[in-house]
Image (cartoon, coloured by chain):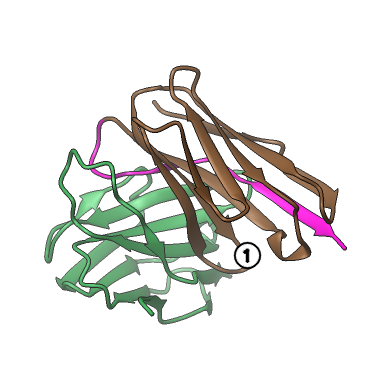
Chain colours: A green, B brown
Amino acid sequence: DVKVTQSSRYLVKRTGEKVFLECVQDMDHENMFWYRQDPGLGLRLIYFSYDVKMKEKGDIPEGYSVSREKKERFSLILESASTNQTSMYLCASSPWQGLLSGANVLTFGAGSRLTVL
Amino acid sequence: KQEVTQIPAALSVPEGENLVLNCSFTDSAIYNLQWFRQDPGKGLTSLLLIQSSQREQTSGRLNASLDKSSGRSTLYIAASQPGDSATYLCAVRPGTGFQKLVFGTGTRLLVSP
């Protein structure tokens, strides 16, 4: 069964701490995404990557960075966590099917719920 | 900027009812629309994907339709079951931008036995 695995389901961190959220996929997908999900706001794209060492800003990249050193792993980094980064973080991946392709089914991980105190 | 709206935000029905969930989007220039299911505290599971050239897709008791010109999609669930209780989200892939999806805020469905 193909999977996107997020290493931590629940984290509690303090303001100012550096936080790493890890995501690993075993489907050999080129594209990987980090979203955050908040009540009433839906899912918002933070960063995405379409290849190793490549990254692109999404809609809300401020306060976050990412790392993609290997194809299967995409890490989200909060350099200095703040209370407004308390949220559910969702990682997803999809195969590369070209910029004009319409078939881009995303596979999501189970999510990481982060609380910043 | 593409915006996706789902109404109602919550829906409660008795088991066995047929129901329709609605999704609307502001820009009709899309590549596709996708419906997801999310169980509490979990990630999203893709249910159906409709390409912009298609009118509908079916999977079991689920049928999704797309009217691109009016900016609307519906997800029809036949003979609802308690196991269908979840939040349903729709997402569109805009006609521009790299494979980025724009999500609605979802409809929370409760099917009572």
Q: Residue at x 11, y 64 (%)?
A: A53
Question: Above or below — where is A108 with respect to B108?
Answer: below
Q: Residue at x 49, y 69 (%)?
A: A111
Q: Residue at x 49, y 72 (%)?
A: A110
Residue A11's spot in the image, x, y percent?
A: 52, 78
Residue B85's spot in the image, x, y percent?
A: 72, 60
Considering depth in this image, is A39 or A100 the residue closer to the camera?
A100
User: B97 left or right of A111?
Assistant: left
Q: Which residues are magenta?
A: B96-113
Question: Above or below — where is A12 with respect to A31?
Answer: below
User: B102 left or right of A104?
Assistant: right
Q: Residue at x 23, y 59 (%)?
A: A95
Q: Chain of mark 1?
A: B
The total number of labels drawn is 1
> For mark 1, what is the residue?
B39
User: B44 left or right of A35?
Assistant: right
User: A117 left or right of A31?
Assistant: right
Residue A26's spot in the image, x, y percent?
A: 27, 78
Quarter of the rendering occupied by the N terminus of chain A: bottom left
Q: Is residue A106 visible?
A: yes
Question: Is B110 one of the magenta-colored residues?
Answer: yes
Label 1: which secondary element: loop
Considering depth in this image, is A113 or B93 the residue closer to the camera?
B93
Extreme residue in the top direction: B69
Q: Quadrant of residue A47?
A: bottom left
Q: Is residue B9 visible?
A: no
Q: Quadrant of residue A91?
A: bottom left
Question: Above or below — where is B21 with respect to B24?
Answer: below
Residue A67's spot in the image, x, y percent?
A: 21, 68
Task: Check disc 1 and give the amino acid type.
Answer: Asp
